[in-house]
């Protein structure tokens, strides 16, 4: 037993006894390594190293003496910020690729943007760890406290200033389809609590407690892991889903972003879409079946409804019983010139517009500029769109095809937000995500985006149709299984049948409330317990 205890203490002591710049460097490095649990790497096992190391760093830095709550918060916040900075820098460096598309204008901004976003996002991680540090102890409950703190601040990050829940810690197991099924019960933020709590649990093996107690605590976490994996395996093992009475064709033209808005290429690009729409059927397509053709976000490089003959040519390219759903920019008169919207159009085979959805959640600095008057003084304007800026739509809405199939459009990064059906009047038959990830080339960005969109299907029990300009386009069933897909920068078509939706999931019924309330009560319980303990000591 002594030999085993000695072995178990070698790695923890490296972190427990770290000091000054060594502690700070180790904390940032742990955060950076944590990002390798995300796509396209999906090395979830690294969480078994990085989260315990974070616990040990806190064990060595947080002063457990009564009456030092602010000092504990400050220490926890600093370490949490460093962990978050490393995590977001390692997981979001690819955002800099967007600044190289028009390098002559924006390349100078790339290092600032690549660093500024992790600096800001890490504030939430710092807040979560700092909250846990206030009530830190030498007992197993500190692991649950850390999970609760990061769950609450991941949710906060998804809502403050329009929200940016990209790479929430729950996505650390997105590479495991069986573990991801838990999202149908507890959603993304419940999955965050599970990931942090279970993968931090090995830290207690180094505690100064009887070995049996330590092993029991870790065994409890292992049982939770097996139970969640077992639930997912059973859910995936159940009978394959039926298909709905609608066929889908996804067009992925793989047009380089540098060419997208060149005036001399716009007719060629439009014709490419028309030719691919009319190509012979393949895959799982059925002749004579009602069909939806899907083009990606802002597919055509002009204002669709203001281009003479464009809608007529689209109608000519569509067979009977076929409709087109496409992303496109639209304009309407505003108070100061035209207002532009990033939209989804439903177009019938006669070339008539049958429905429009305007994007509600706009990308900060990509589709609009927060604090624009101030930032324009620094030379910062729209950084991604071809126009000056977009207006936000009013609210999410379900569009309906002529065959009465309802779908919820999600344009680009709208697919990263949990609770996608919140505020929607009726439950749709499927989710539809149109996007253009060409800005980010062959970086991890498009893979992360796909994984997050896939979790929306699992959460809601709805199939997902995804059309991306350069990939990754896919048809995903309500359990998150990829039915068909096209690789990144592959020009091609997907002809598939629409999977049948499932009944409403538990998460679809109860939302994020239970996970947040549970996390909140863990923090409250830890505070009450510590107060009572200090009272007894005094």
Image (cartoon, rainbow, N blue to C red):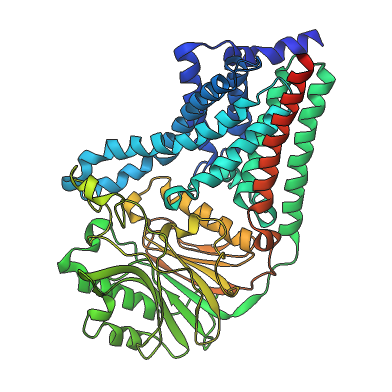
In-front residue for pair 386/442: 386
Above or below: residue 161 compared with residue 485: above
Q: Residue at x 57, y 65 (%)?
A: 421
Can residue 167 be seen in this snapshot? no
- Could you say which is closer to the camera, residue 51 or residue 419? 419
Please tell me which residue lies in front, 192 or 291.
Answer: 192
Instruction: Residue 441 in the image: state x and y as whole percent.
Output: 34, 50
Q: In the figure, is residue 250 to the left or right of 140?
A: left
- Please say if 404 is above or below 518: below
Residue at the spot x=30%, y=62% of the render?
255
Q: Position of residue 195 (x, y in %)?
A: 64, 40
Image quadrant holding the C terminus, namely top right
Q: Is residue 43 left or right of residue 200?
A: left
Where does the image place residue 372, in percent across and percent down from the top left?
25, 51
Find residue 363 and report its image quarter: bottom left
User: Eyeballing the image, is 390 above or below 526?
Assistant: below
379 with respect to 416 (left or right): left
Residue lying furthest right = 212
In which image quadrant can residue 246 be found? bottom right
Q: Which image quarter: residue 143?
A: top right
Q: Is residue 115 visible?
A: yes
Instruction: Determine whether 309 is above or below 393 in the image.
Output: below
Left or right of residue 141: residue 243? left
Total count of labels: 0
Residue name at image x 67 percent, y 41 percent: 519
Question: Can you say which quadrant of the picture contains the N terminus?
Answer: top right
What percent of the width, then of the height, locates residue 342? Answer: 34, 67
């Amino acid at each position: 037993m002594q030999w085993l205890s000695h072995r178990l203490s070698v790695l923890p002591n490296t972190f427990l006894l770290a000091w000054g710049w060594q502690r700070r460097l180790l904390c940032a490095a742990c955060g950076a390594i944590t990002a390798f649990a995300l796509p396209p790497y999906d090395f979830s096992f690294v969480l078994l190293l990085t989260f315990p190391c974070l616990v040990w760093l806190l064990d060595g830095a947080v002063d457990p003496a009564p009456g030092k709550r602010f000092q504990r918060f400050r220490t926890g916040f600093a370490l949490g910020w460093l962990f978050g900075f490393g995590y977001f820098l390692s997981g979001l460096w690819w955002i800099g690729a967007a600044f190289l598309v028009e390098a002559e204008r924006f390349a100078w901004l790339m290092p600032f943007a690549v660093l500024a976003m992790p600096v800001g996002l890490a504030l939430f991680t710092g807040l979560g760890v700092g909250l846990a540090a206030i009530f830190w102890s030498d007992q197993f409950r500190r692991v649950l406290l850390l999970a609760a703190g990061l769950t609450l601040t991941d949710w906060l990050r998804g809502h403050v200033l329009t929200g940016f829940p990209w790479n929430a810690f729950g996505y650390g197991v997105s590479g495991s389809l069986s573990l991801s099924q838990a999202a149908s019960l507890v959603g993304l933020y419940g999955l965050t609590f599970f990931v942090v709590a279970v993968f931090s649990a090995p830290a207690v093996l180094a505690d100064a407690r009887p070995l049996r107690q330590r092993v029991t605590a870790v065994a409890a976490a292992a049982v939770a892991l097996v139970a969640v994996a077992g639930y997912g395996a059973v859910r995936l093992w159940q009978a394959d889903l039926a298909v709905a009475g609608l066929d889908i064709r996804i067009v992925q033209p793989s047009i380089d972003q540098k060419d997208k808005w060149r005036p001399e290429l716009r007719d060629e690009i439009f014709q490419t879409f028309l030719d691919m729409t009319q190509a012979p059927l393949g895959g799982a397509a059925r002749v004579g079946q009602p069909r939806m053709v899907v083009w990606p976000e802002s597919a055509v490089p002009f204002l669709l409804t203001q281009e003479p003959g464009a809608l007529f040519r689209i109608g000519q390219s569509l067979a009977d019983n076929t409709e087109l759903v496409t992303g496109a920019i639209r304009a309407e008169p505003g108070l100061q010139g035209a207002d532009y919207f990033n939209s989804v159009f439903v177009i019938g085979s006669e070339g008539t517009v049958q429905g429009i959805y305007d994007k509600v959640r706009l990308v900060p600095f990509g589709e609009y500029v927060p604090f624009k008057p101030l930032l324009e003084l620094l030379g910062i304007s729209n950084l991604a769109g071809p126009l000056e800026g977009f207006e936000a739509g009013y609210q999410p809405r379900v569009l309906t095809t002529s065959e009465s199939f309802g779908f919820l459009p999600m344009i680009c990064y709208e697919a990263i937000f949990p609770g996608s059906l919140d505020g929607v009047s009726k439950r749709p038959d499927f989710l539809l995500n149109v996007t253009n990830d060409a800005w980010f080339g062959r970086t991890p960005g498009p893979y992360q985006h796909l994984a997050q969109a896939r979790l929306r299907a699992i959460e809601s029990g709805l199939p997902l149709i995804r059309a991306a300009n350069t990939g990754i386009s896919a048809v995903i069933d309500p359990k998150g299984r990829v039915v068909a897909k096209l690789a990144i920068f592959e020009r091609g078509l997907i002809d598939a049948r629409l999977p049948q939706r499932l009944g409403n999931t538990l998460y679809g019924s109860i939302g994020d409330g239970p996970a947040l309330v549970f996390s909140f009560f863990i923090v409250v319980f830890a505070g009450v317990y510590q107060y009572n303990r200090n009272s007894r000591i005094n």
